[in-house]
Amino acid sequence: DAGVTQSPTHLIKTRGQQVTLRCSPISGHKSVSWYQQVLGQGPQFIFQYYEKEERGRGNFPDRFSARQFPNYSSELNVNALLLGDSALYLCASSLATSGQMNEQFFGPGTRLTVL
Amino acid sequence: AQTVTQSQPEMSVQEAETVTLSCTYDTSENNYYLFWYKQPPSRQMILVIRQEAYKQQNATENRFSVNFQKAAKSFSLKISDSQLGDTAMYFCAFTFTNFGNEKLTFGTGTRLTIIP
């Protein structure tokens, strides 16, 4: 089975632009989470979606938004890009089985560079 | 708020030796999970080992084991018989058991280099 996939792999934008990142979870996984990993730091939680509903939101400005589709894939949108948004954006999926702490499987990430 | 601290930014060890990576965390929760993730250069992050806070027995996965000290809020990773493929960034992570909320809080990572 394919793992978590993300597109695009790399992206270069300029300040003020908008960007959309995409994630396809492992087949059967209903939960998708997004993380931002700035160079030299650990990933920071942005959002979690489960069954198309937002289940968690990290400490990020409203310029960041996300959604989950009926097939459980997800998009992360960032508006009015700032230089500080340059990072590796990771997507993770899990089964989200009731009553269990499910392993999260990470995708390869999208490297966003803001010039 | 939960915090995770990794005080060793970089470590290196000779192949076949044993190395221990440190992690401390702070939380007021009683039920939670701790993880070690491995992020090889330019490759995907993968789970190495996990520990449930309610379990007193330390988790082991082949050459990887943890030393979980709940009272001290310490969670170290021991890698035995280290191999070249163990070269990677290692992140300690925490989540509390709240079904539906799978937020992971990560430390800043330890860059481990295995020397041939």
Image: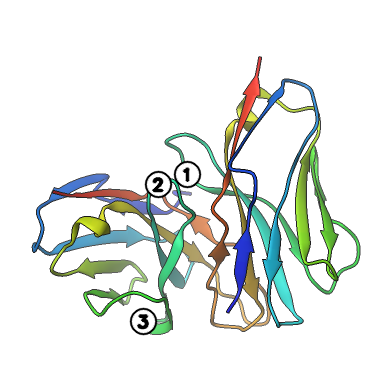
Which residue lies under the disc numbered 2?
A108
Whether labels 3 and 2 share one chain: yes
> At label 3, which amino acid type do we have?
Lys
CB-based contact (under 8 Å), mark 1 and mark 2: yes
Q: Please tell me which residue is depicted at 33% across the width and 60% down the height of the picture.
A: A23
Q: Residues within 10 Å of mark 1 (few under 14, many from 20)?
A: some
Question: Is any atom of residue A27 visible in this view?
Answer: no
Residue A106's x, y, as percent?
48, 54
- Disc on the earlier residue, 3 or 2: 3
Q: Please tell me which residue is depicted at 42% across the width and 54% down the height of the picture.
A: A4
Quadrant position of residue B68: bottom right
Work out whether B85 lies above or below B6: above
Which residue lies under the disc numbered 1?
B44
Whether labels 1 and 3 share one chain: no
Secondary element under disc 3, as helix, strand or loop, is: loop
Residue A11's x, y, as percent?
19, 47
> At label 1, which amino acid type do we have?
Gln
Residue A47's x, y, as percent?
39, 74
Q: Residues within 10 Å of mark 3 (few under 14, many from 20)?
A: some
Work out whether A106 lies above or below A16: above
Which residue lies under the disc numbered 3?
A52
Foreground tag (1 vs 3) = 1
Q: Is residue A9 left or right of residue B22?
A: left
Residue B57's x, y, as percent?
91, 61
Foreground tag (3 vs 2) = 2
Whether labels 1 and 2 share one chain: no
